[in-house]
Amino acid sequence: MNKEAIILEESTLDPGNWEAMKELGHRMLDDMFAYLQSVRGRPAWKKPSAYAVSSLQAPLPQLPQEPSEVYEDFFTQVLPYNTNNIHPRFWAWVQGGGTPFGMLADMLASGMNANVSIGDHIPMQVEKQVIEWSKEMMGFPSTAGGLLVGGCSLANITALIVARNHFHQSVRQKGLRAVPAQMIVYGSAETHNCVVKGVEVIGLGSENFRKVPVNDDYRIDIDELQRMIDEDRAAGHLPFCIIGNAGTVNTGAIDPLESLAAIAKKEKCWFHVDGAFGAIPRILPEFNDRLKGIELADSLGFDFHKWLYVNYEVACVLIRDASIHREAFATSVNYLLGHERGLSGGPDPFNNYGMELSRGFKALKVWMSLKEHGIQKYRQMVRQNLRQTQYLAGLVELDPELELMADVPLNIVCFRFNPGNFDDETLNRINKEVLMRLQEEGIAAPSYTLLHGKYVIRVANTNHRSRLEDFDVLTAETVRIGREVAGEIL
Ligand SMILES: *Cc1c(COP(=O)(O)O)cnc(C)c1O
């Protein structure tokens, strides 16, 4: 081995010119601040240009490119065609808008490059702190277990894995064949699709998720749930888990969580609450009654990146009994054993509480954001969104050409353009066209859903940049475009 020759070849991925990289970094920061500050003046959505799309179908780069040139590619081909949930009139699906301070926190986390999995280092403690705060917000006991994950989909799936592994102690070793009969999960027909995926992931199959019918208010029909459980028991099946929705994705309906908790207790079922966004108003005293029962759940999933406005991506799963949580995932392999001292000392590794081993430092942006604003400010913002939502519902109801399509129990408004002289099928076509034009013209970006076969324009307001005037724009423009489209159809 020729040491000299190896030294001559030695290299690193750090910049050759730190000064130039620093200067570029400062320019990026300036550009991003300018971008965020000026967001209101840009369209709510813009279709990616053909040029931008084709620039992303290039072959694998073989040779180096100057960082400033790479940044130029980002600035011209990527940044202009953002999802754009940062825009004040973005209300599609359920997406939060992030914050400038959250952006900075992500930069710090990435600079540290912390792997928040195992070891004695402070990022582990930051995540534990965020989990403690999460329990406090959601009324979970301080003895509960928890974990930050990428989104509520994963939070729900993690909870389902814990529920399954707890239901039958040999599932981890022997698989589902150890269970003598078919395990069944129950949730309303309005339950988010990711829960059904979770039922598939834990090996039960989606046919063993019982979609319990809902009432007119889209809340689960409790009597029907009880009937289905009885029926399954009579058939020799094993009811094992009940899902409660704190805010359904379609309309924001909140299931009667306390009643569900009581049924789960009586039936010895696990009770999981999907509170992706709808659990957040639990920080408001005026929601004590409506969200009562969350604190009784065996597990809860909720997002920080939706209604707590933290930058993508971060969610939390809480498990009432930390030891049950640990039993579902803990392993003891030689290369991950804890030590009394040194780097391998420190808190219980997070990989004992979930599927991931390597994990990023997503706790930092949550920790920094909650400290930046304090929970009082979040209360104010969530209330603001709720008031705006009621205002929008009021605008819809006042307008003879608009129709409110569902109750508005939370922050979601479903409505349609309906001048009164079309059948449902035509209205479906008109409203789909209206929505596409609202987006293409850059006016606003709501999304849609079908309620009883009727196409509705759907606004989910988790937007801390929206103002009342934005909802005036939405309704006025919906009517203008609606008339335009209806005129073309006639
Ligand atoms: C968004 C949502 C989910 C999924 O959460 P992600 O963070 O997108 O993974 C689950 N349930 C409900 C009710 C949701 O609104």
Image (cartoon, rainbow, N blue to C red):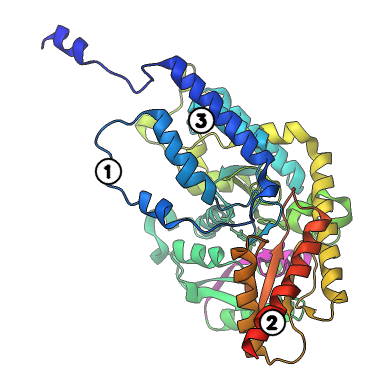
Is residue 254 at all visible to an observer of this figure?
A: no
In this figure, which residue is indicated by the disc labeled 3? 110
The residue lying at 67 percent from left, 33 percent from top is 101
In this figure, which residue is indicated by the disc labeled 2? 224
Instruction: Count the numbered circles shown.
Output: 3
Note whether 71 is above or below 454 in the view shown: above
Q: Nearer the viewer, mark 3 or mark 1?
A: 1
Give the x, y percent position of residue 92: 64, 61
Is residue 489 at all visible to an observer of this figure?
A: yes
The residue lying at 64 percent from left, 36 percent from top is 34
Q: Amino acid at mark 2?
A: Glu
Q: Nearer the viewer, residue 31 or 402?
A: 31
Q: Amino acid at mark 3?
A: Ser
The answer to whether marks 3 and 1 mark residues whose Cβ atoms lie closer than 8 Å is no
Q: Nearer the viewer, residue 206 or 397?
A: 397
Q: Residue furthest left?
A: 1
The answer to whether marks 3 and 2 mark residues whose Cβ atoms lie closer than 8 Å is no
Q: Which mark is residue 230?
A: none
Q: Amino acid at mark 1?
A: Leu
Is residue 250 on the magenta stretch?
yes
Using the rendered view, name the quadrant where residue 129 is placed.
Answer: top right
Q: Is 356 left, or right, of 462 in this rendering?
A: left
Q: Which mark is residue 60?
A: 1
Magenta stretch bounds: 236-262
Give the x, y percent position of residue 392: 82, 65
The residue lying at 86 percent from left, 60 percent from top is 289
Q: Is 129 left, or right, of 49 in this rendering?
A: right
Is residue 352 on the magenta stretch?
no
Using the rendered view, name the quadrant where residue 224 is placed.
Answer: bottom right
Q: Is 453 left, or right, of 340 in this rendering?
A: right
Q: Nearer the viewer, mark 3 or mark 2?
A: 3
